[in-house]
Every structure is written in structure tokens, then in C-alpha cells.
Amino acid sequence: VGYAIDIGLFAQHPDDVIEGDNHVLLLERRAVREGKNVFELVLDAAPKFGGIDPYNKLIDRVSGDNIISTDGTFRMQFFQANPPDEAF
């Protein structure tokens, strides 16, 4: 890492929004480096969700962990491939 990535704060989880951008409280590119990153952001309203690369523009092994709620929970999405047919 070492380049600018989208940082977002939201009133609603972006996956729950069908249209519009009223749920977006802040969306801006910030420099992200390896290790712990701290961002100080000032808003008019308290967010319910925050994320890094919230719209999955970058290649990511687990895209379901890009957004976290303010209570510290993720809405993880894992896909398990069908097990191989053992009767070759």
C-alpha cells in the first residue's frame, strides 16, 4: 500500500441503498500506508458505517470486510465453492 484509497462514512450501509447518495456523509481519497492508519474526520452527522474502498474499486481477496458499522461489526460475505465430486 502507499497510495490514495477511498475512505467513506455513511448513514446507511451502501449495500442497502438502491438509489441516490444521501447516505454518503463523506467520501474522499486519503493516503494509506502499511500498518495502522488514523484519520481525523469532522462531519455534521454521526455515521453508522465507515469503510476503506467501500465500493470495491480495488482488487480485494475479501471485499466483505471493507465496511464496518460503528458498533464494530462487519457484514461479511463468503462464498464457498461446491465440494469436488468424490466419485471421479
Image (cartoon, grey):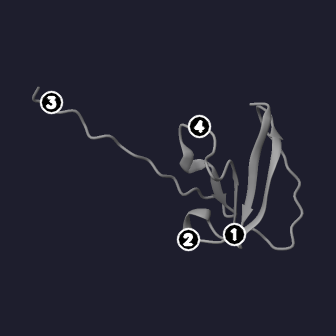
Specify whether 75 is left or right of 51: left
N-terminal-most mark, 4 or 1: 1
Residue 59 tag number: 4
Name the one closer to the observer, 4 or 19. 19
Task: Give the x, y percent position of residue 86.
Answer: 15, 30
Residue behind mark 1: 21
Crowd band around label 2 with a 10 angstrom C-alpha radius: few (<14), some (14–19), many (20+): few
Residue at x 69%, y 69% (from the top left corner): 21
Instruction: Determine which quarter of the picture holds residue 20.
Output: bottom right
Residue behind mark 3: 86
Q: Residue furthest front?
A: 20
N-terminal-most mark, 3 or 2: 2
Residue at x 64%, y 56% (from the top left corner): 68
Q: Quadrant of the C terminus?
A: top left
Q: Are marks 1 and 3 in contact (CB under 8 Å)?
A: no
Q: Are marks 3 and 2 in contact (CB under 8 Å)?
A: no
N-terminal-most mark, 3 or 4: 4
Q: Secondary structure at mark 2?
A: loop
Residue behind mark 2: 18
Q: Nearer the viewer, mark 3 or mark 4?
A: 4
Specify whether 45 is left or right of 16: right
Q: Nearer the viewer, mark 3 or mark 2?
A: 2
